[in-house]
Amino acid sequence: MKVLLVGVGTVGEAIARLSADRHWLERMVLADYSLERARSVSDSLPREGIFSAQQIDAGSRASLVELIRDSGADLVMNAVDPSFVMPIFDAAFEAGVDYMDMAVSLSEPHPEEPFSRPGVKLGDEQFARSVAWEDRGRLALVGMGMDPGLSDVFAASAAKHLFDEIDQVNVRDGGDLRVEGHPFAPVFSIWTTIEECLNPPIIWEKDRGWYTTEPFAEPERFVFPEGVGPVECVHVEHEEVLLVPRWLDAKKVTFKYALGEDFIDVLRTLHRLGLDRKEKVRVKGVEVAPRDVVAALTPDPATIGDQMVGRAIVGTWVTGRRNGSPREVFLYQLADAQETMRVHGLQPVAWQTGFNPVLAMELLAEGAWQGAGVLGPEAFDPDPYLSLMDERGIHHGMREIEPGSAVANA
């Protein structure tokens, strides 16, 4: 497979590094706005001649189409901020190649009732083009990171093997991961953090459809496995809630994230000051987006891996019935900060996010996963994916939960 990787930031670098020794990879072009960054990563990778670097403006569809065609890519791997999803997605379609991303097209809150009704939902722009992709016989695999991505594969596996009837699919993202030495340091893109945390969270109910609520609503102390224990999680806008109901039969789908009170306070302050805004403002003759200023002043997640301590756990808590009896399980993956730095030279969230598109590319390259149109991870058989995780020695587990005990003090 020949791949054009657009974006060589924290996760883009992880994708390149984790692909480097894979037999299915024929060539990978690393494209970034910073040619210096792309060259630095490319030059550090083994297998001379497999990797090369190019400069690209991910917002320019015409430039992207030209680069896709020049690269001879079979697949465009999108590893930039979700604000660039649509130019890259549309460029891949125009160039006639397959596409993959880890975050879908952005939402727009309802103009009148943002905290009860969705406006433009996550992924709406992409799914509106699904028939065109299917007619062309090309695949756009969307939301194929850690969460969304592996969390969706877990949901599909639970539906296939563990339940006769599913009540709820609830993704929970937490752990005890922290960054030492910084008063405020997100473990992944601050731009994306602001986007998903301050937008109205979305929830799915079969009898109601999609609806929204206030940011950080309905806190719960979810009990994470492997000694982490209860950690407070809150509603956050996330792709699984838009993906799971399209392919799996569930009565309710939610996503909650363990942000922590201090982190939430910072995000609320940014919002009150208008520093979360994407629209540019003029400052002393210069136009700049406030959110970009915040991003420039926040530690780069790619450079602080050696200061991260603890574990990140992402999992899918599924409830329902099996053989007539209530059942609850938590399917999860755990990454230890010190281990991922020692083994892979990558901070845990970068590794945890990056290995998933690499596995998906391998399954596509070998024909184990096939499809056309705009599809999420749930549209594919989860078994080859989880088997490949086992072959690669990637930890994943399942905790059987006594019904009603997943949340502490509930």
Image (cartoon, rainbow, N blue to C red):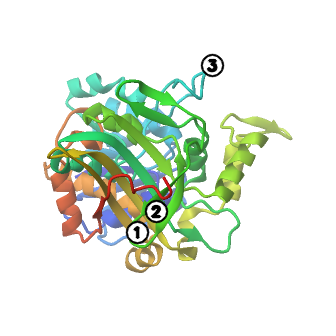
- Measured Cα–Cα span from mark 2 to mark 3: 36 Å
Q: CA distance from mark 2 to mark 1?
A: 8 Å
Dot 2 amino acid type: Val
Q: Secondary structure at mark 3?
A: loop
Specify whether 370 is left or right of 80: left
Residue designated by label 1: 335
Judged from this view, the residue extending furthest toward the bottom is 342
Residue at 36%, 24% in the rendered image? 207
Q: Quadrant of residue 182?
A: bottom right
Q: Nearer the viewer, mark 2 or mark 3?
A: 3
Residue 127, can we see it? yes
Looking at the picture, how far across and down is residue 293, in whole percent?
71, 49
Which residue is drawn at the image coordinates 60% and 62% (left, top)?
300
Q: Residues within 10 Å of mark 3 (few under 14, many from 20)?
A: few
Q: Earlier in the sequence, mark 2 or mark 3?
A: 3
For marks 3 and 1, the one nearer the N-term is 3
Q: Is residue 73 visible?
A: no
Look at the numbered discs 2 and 1 and tell me whether their residues touch, using CB distance below 8 Å: yes
Nearer to me, 389 or 254: 254
Residue at mark 3 to residue at mark 1: CA–CA distance: 41 Å
Element marked by disc 2: helix
Q: Please give the residue where the numbered disc 2 appears in the rendered image.
A: 349
Residue 112 image label:
3
